[in-house]
Amino acid sequence: MLKGTLLYLANRRPVYRAVMRHDLLRGLTQRYVAGEDLADGIVVAQTLNTQRLMATLDHLGESVTNAAEARAATAGYLEALETISREQVDANISLKLTQLGLDVSRELCVAHLRKILERARELETFVRIDMESSAYTQRTLDVHAELWNEGFHNVGVVLQTYLLRTAADVQRAIEMGVRVRLCKGAYLEPARVAYANKADVDANYARLMERLMAHGTYPALATHDERLIRHAIAFAARESIGPERFEFQMLFGVRRDLQLRLVEQGYRVRIYVPYGRAWYPYLVRRMAERPANLMFFMRSMVQEALAGRRNGRRQG
Ligand code: FDA
């Protein structure tokens, strides 16, 4: 219920404006976001590299409503690719199609993605298309398939185990040879398309993870769930799947202990590093994943309201 309310608030502009005006989430932003600029993302990625962790850089932004913003996001990603290559950072990029203009025009979005994939191919870098809410699942997979069929094989997708359709999508990705990042899913979804029960989402994760590890192309297992990570390690041992055939992925600011422990054990681990000014929806999704973050947010709101009343009394 709380989680649903929070995810609903992720798209409400008045709430967003109040949060920004009062800087209510400063503490959480610092925990989950590298900073406002590409340079901040690069520094974090370089630091992770010194700890043998790989990175994927996410220039925060989604749901853009005009072509100029989509062009700017594309330019931002091209700059990120150049910098990663020039500074020899062990990192690739993650992007969202609504950031490249999918809501403005499909052709525009495809043209932007094509430009990014061309440059990434020249620089021998990989591009991951994040998955957004279920309203975009089919369109995202269709845009991916279009560019894949043009010969761009340096691009992978994300599939979410809370969706009922995902077993079929995993099967198609295996047949195509597409690299999949498997995650549980972070959006508010109706019961007609998604499992409502967390146990079902986790069970589906375990099932699809096994399928991808056994038959897929270098899957990325994106989770902080220790039970599932132990399951992956045991399955790999049982099926003689070497640690070079898959990678674990986690979010910047989440379970650093576990990230480092897996690297120590010889596994490949990539950290998702977001940077940029449009951090609000990303942060709300992170809060929804962890009730303690929600309490922190509520406390900040109450403190802000009390401080406002005190100031009001003083001024009045
Ligand atoms: P679960 O939610 O069960 O959490 C397991 C444990 O992890 C918790 O008990 C807690 O200890 C810790 N934890 C999880 N989230 C935390 C948080 N925010 N703060 C602190 N601790 C936390 N989703 C999506 O819809 N589209 C996408 O493209 C992506 N991309 C993506 C990339 C990467 C690298 C990761 C790791 C995740 C995503 N996600 C995503 C988000 C994903 O769908 C999911 O919401 C989160 O990973 C949380 O789920 P877990 O699998 O970690 O399990």
Image: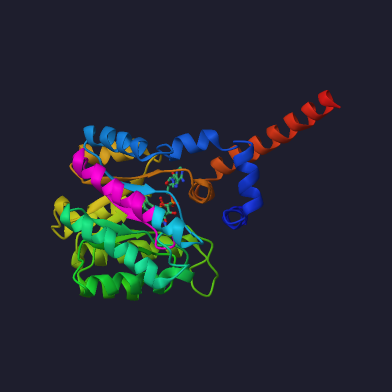
Residue 240 occupies quadrant: bottom left
Residue 70 occupies quadrant: bottom left
Task: Name the residue at 54% across, 71% down.
Answer: 191
The single residue placed furthest to the right in the displayed view is: 316
Residue 33 in view, yes or no = yes
In the rendered image, the quadrant that contains the N terminus is bottom right
Above or below 199: residue 168:
below
Task: Name the residue at 39% across, 39% down.
Answer: 37
Indicate the position of residue 229 as horizontal and vertical percent values.
31, 50
Find out whether residue 310 is within the magenta segment.
no
Q: Nearer the viewer, residue 134 or 313?
A: 313
The single residue placed furthest to the top in the displayed view is: 314
Task: Name the residue at 46% across, 56% down.
Answer: 69
In the rendered image, the quadrant that contains the C terminus is top right
Q: Which residues are magenta?
A: 73-98
Indicate the position of residue 81 as horizontal and vertical percent values.
26, 48
Q: Is residue 311 left or right of residue 127?
A: right
The single residue placed furthest to the front in the displayed view is: 68
Indicate the position of residue 2 as horizontal and vertical percent values.
62, 53
Residue 222 in view, yes or no = no
Q: Nearer the viewer, residue 231 or 95?
A: 95
